[in-house]
Amino acid sequence: MKKKIQIVSMLCVLITNGLFAQESFKVMFYNLLNFPLETNVPDRIQYLDNILDNYQPDILTVCELNNVSGANTVLQVLQNRVSEDFRSAVFTLNTSDDNLGNQNDLQNLIYYNSSKFILESQDVVTTIYRDFNHYKLKLNSVNQDSNPVYLDVIVCHLKASSGTDNQALRLEMVQDLTTYLNTFPSNSYIMLAGDLNVYTSSEPAFQELLDNTNNIVFTDPANKVGSWHNNTNYIDVFTQSTRTQTGLGGSIGGFDDRFDFILTSTNMLSNADLYYADSSYQVYGNNGNISCYNNEIKDIECSGSDFSSEIREALYYFSDHLPVTLQLETNEALLNIQTYNIESFQIIGTNLIENTLEVRINNQSYQTKKLNIFNTLGQVVKTVPLDASKTISIDVSNLNNGLYYITMSNTNVKPLKFIKSN
């Protein structure tokens, strides 16, 4: 009886933690510099491989993607280095008027971990110059039917270059986005990721995004609004240029501008469903070293404790921009969040199970153990002996619908949770 009470107590803790634990998601935006058509640096993909392997994003948004072949190459890196659950939205060519210059070889796209997010829809906002791409994600949560949580992600690349004419074009593009967002519920959770090409927060396009009279009001979660260009007070949010050397493609201006951003709707600073994790905004590869001003990101002047020389060199050779990152958090429980040690065992695919539970054994020293499935009362409802197989299929068709935990006997390996539903 005492042993049963202990098991019930343990499962109560696990259920409480599983249903109410705070989950976090790593987000990255990256200007890929004409990928894959820019070939001045041979085999650039090896550097992106290092970058994504090191950061391990849950959502990756990109601009300056040339074609579907490049889109698939990036997806393959994510599946190989981050998670086999990564997917992308449908690659689409720019549809906006290109009378100001052929922009149809520069596209936006989103990649996402499908165990954590579900792509509900995608749409295009046309402008005078380049599209805004809108991707609607739904949190893959336990309560997604009764309390769905949506994240609307807008990816963009505004008109480049200084001068009043280019400022006016950027403003016109953003005004088209404002009109589009007027149709959204005002409490929508929206993230805008892009290369905005603005030199100061006083520029009309940026002010339009922050306008309090808009239906959707954006904010800078880095809280670094100001005049960024050539201003070392903002060096920790500089994103361009990683280079001074010619012949690599892209800009060679050295580290002196903040062009790349992830902005959030203001409600993402204060709600409980999906919100910005305080102080998580970071320019990936930027050590905040003031000596880095006007230098190359791989130089010793740009060294620091956050990003190694190896990572900064990969960033230098892949693009003339640095990625921007932040973290989001939720109090919702995810269906597919992994609570196991990768050294032990894992559920393959979704943990919303109809008839068959697929399990991969990652540590073959456990092949003499057993898997036990508990219901929420602490009762063992199924026991499965292990053998030399790396993957096993467990028939759970006879179990009642509900939450279950699967544990490994005589080990301290954390239990996994799954939901039987049909």
Image (tube, rainbow, N blue to C red):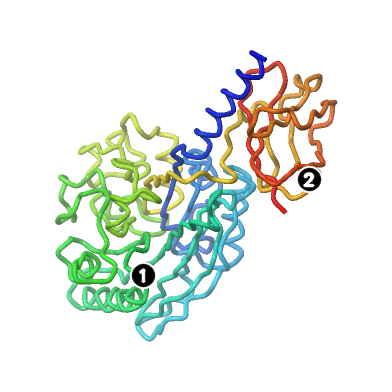
Residue 65 x %, y %: 49, 64
Q: Choose between 349 and 207: the one closer to the eye.
A: 349
| Amino acid beneath label 1 | Pro
Q: Which secondary structure lies at badge 2? A: strand
Where residue 91 sits: x, y (%)? 56, 68
Q: Is 178 situated above or below 243?
A: below
Spatial CA distance of label 1 from label 2 is 39 Å
Where's residue 180, x and y in %?
A: 36, 77
Of residue 411 and residue 135, the one placed in the foreground of this image is 411
Which quadrant would residue 176 be assigned to in this image? Answer: bottom left
Q: Secondary structure at mark 1?
A: loop
User: What residue do we see at 17% from left, 75% from top?
Assistant: 164
Residue 191 lies in quadrant: bottom left
Q: Residue at x 15, y 45 (%)?
A: 233
Query: In the image, which disc is placed on residue 356?
Result: 2
The numbered mark, 1 or 2, whose residue comes first in the sequence reads: 1
- Above or below, 16 against 27 in this view is above
Which quadrant of the figure contains the C terminus?
bottom right
Q: Is residue 94 above or below residue 154?
A: below
* Residue identifier under label 1: 185
Would you say 270 lies left or right of 68 here? left
- Total label count? 2
Q: Residue furthest top?
A: 2
Are the residues tagged 1 and 2 within 8 Å (C-beta)?
Answer: no
Q: Residues within 10 Å of mark 2 (few under 14, many from 20)?
A: few
